[in-house]
Amino acid sequence: FRRLGLRGMKQRLLVVANRLPVSANRRGEDHWSLEISAGGLVSALLGVKDVDAKWIGWAGVNVPDEVGQRALTKALAEKRCIPVFLDEEIVHQYYNGYCNNILWPLFHYLGLPQEDRLATTRNFESQFDAYKRANQMFADVVYQHYQEGDVIWCHDYHLMFLPKCLKDHDINMKVGWFLHTPFPSSEIYRTLPSRLELLRSVLCADLVGFHTYDYARHFVSACTRILGLEGTPEGVEDQGRLTRVAAFPIGIDSDRFKRALELPAVKRHISELTQRFAGRKVMLGVDRLDMIKGIPQKILAFEKFLEENPDWNDKVVLLQIAVPTRTDVPEYQKLTSQVHEIVGRINGRFGTLTAVPIHHLDRSLDFHALCALYAVTDVALVTSLRDGMNLVSYEYVACQGSKKGVLILSEFAGAAQSLGAGAILVNPWNITEVADSIRHALTMPSDEREKRHRHNYAHVTTHTAQDWAETFVFELNDTVAEALLRTRQ
Ligand code: ADQ
């Protein structure tokens, strides 16, 4: 900031993400009610010092009429949000199609569409077209609000084409792009038909960030192998221009969780849950119901544990909270039925008249109930098949100050890089290994539990969401300043 003469000034930051952090409900022709979703990204950005942040994104609703659009724009302005209006057709092609059916599975190593999803491949061109058009619509809204000196921070795989749109408009814009998912090995990435255009666009950004060093390395390899560019320790170089590439591991607002544990409502939840499960060890899973989260694999591993450890049968319970997501997509519907089927079978097999081994809820929990669950449970089970970071593992650790529960964590979650020394790391595909880890976690001596917890707690409370956002914005300013100095020399 100092080098740019910004010391003491509030710098404007435009955060561009597919979804605004609000849920909007229409209450009349020109009246909207808004609820801010207090996710990690929101608290991260609220906590960045000397920065005045605004959000640009889709509100998640179709608003075809001008009266509704004007009213929503006005209501959102009070929450420092600016809407991008996408119609149903573009949402279908860009969001459901290209983003969720092509990029999401590919980036999580599930490959390009097969069978059911093959129809999407046939429509690939039109979906990629819609993706580019949607990205251009986000860019148009950015131009309308941009002032010289603003920092523009683009988020995630939905907006890979945005850096190019922005730099084509004004080469001096300061543009950063951050990916919340993994960036896969270049051998996987190179199967994507639009691989060249997307890489070239991301390289238009000044700073490109990932959760882990491995994802950054995969990205640089994709640029060298697919585009034939040169990778340097700082990033990727193309005709003398450097795009800086680095790892910026996200964190959580750990104080928010610690404060919540002191609230009477949360304490009430905690004592209810403690009574409800008295005499049993409680294991917890909290995930969006998505194939990348490995929920069926987790439940099968728990079944294996029950099979091999009959003495534990009525002494342990697994609470699996799964928020339904992308419910209109057939593959997600199939996953839901598959999970229900497995849970039903296991409860039928191991349940008694008074207790069942798995409580499975298909719903989101409010923040207080979630904190209470994190606090009372003995073991958290995170078995993602791939996950950019996985914040549930961080949230669990933040709430375990007194209990010092054990975290079983997939080695394929980004969080394994930061919490690996404290967690029990597992390969989620190996259900025997996960079943053994469950037994290890449930029988772990208290001094080992404390040591492991201390390591993770220190990490989660010192690598916060605020630090993450502050570091990214600082580095982006620095990168641009350095590039300016280089061109002047
Ligand atoms: P997600 O895939 O959504 O995020 P994750 O990082 O675990 O995964 O965050 C989920 C959030 O939703 C957590 O804050 C959690 O508390 C909340 N949540 C999950 N289930 C819930 C439930 N049943 N009820 C209430 N709340 C629930 C993407 C990437 C991740 C990356 C994040 C941030 O896929 O890998 O860590 O972005 O970059």
Image (spheres, helix red, strand yellow):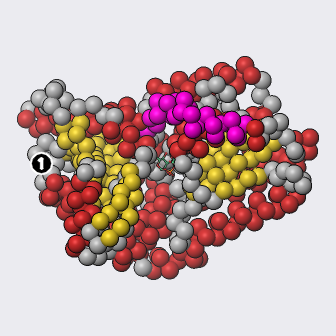
Q: Which residue sits at x=13%, y=42%?
A: 149
Task: Work out which residue is located at the far left of the displayed protein and give it.
Answer: 488
Q: Is residue 262 magenta?
A: yes
Residue 459 position, x and y percent, is 51, 27
Is 447 displayed left or right of 42 in the figure?
right
Residue 51 position, x and y percent, is 24, 36
Q: Is residue 99 visible?
A: yes
- Quarter of the image for residue 59 reads bottom left
Q: Is residue 132 visible?
A: no
Q: Secondary structure at mark 1?
A: loop
Residue at image mark 1: 147
Q: Which residue sits at x=38%, y=64%?
A: 25
Q: Main secondary structure of the magenta part?
A: helix
- The amino acid beneath tag 1 is Gln
Residue 427 position, x and y percent, is 67, 45
Residue 470 in the image: above or below residue 148: above
Is 92 displayed left or right of 168 in the figure?
right
Front residue (pair 118, 268): 268
Magenta-drawn segment: 248-274
Is 211 displayed left or right of 327 in the figure?
left
Quarter of the image containing the C terminus?
top left
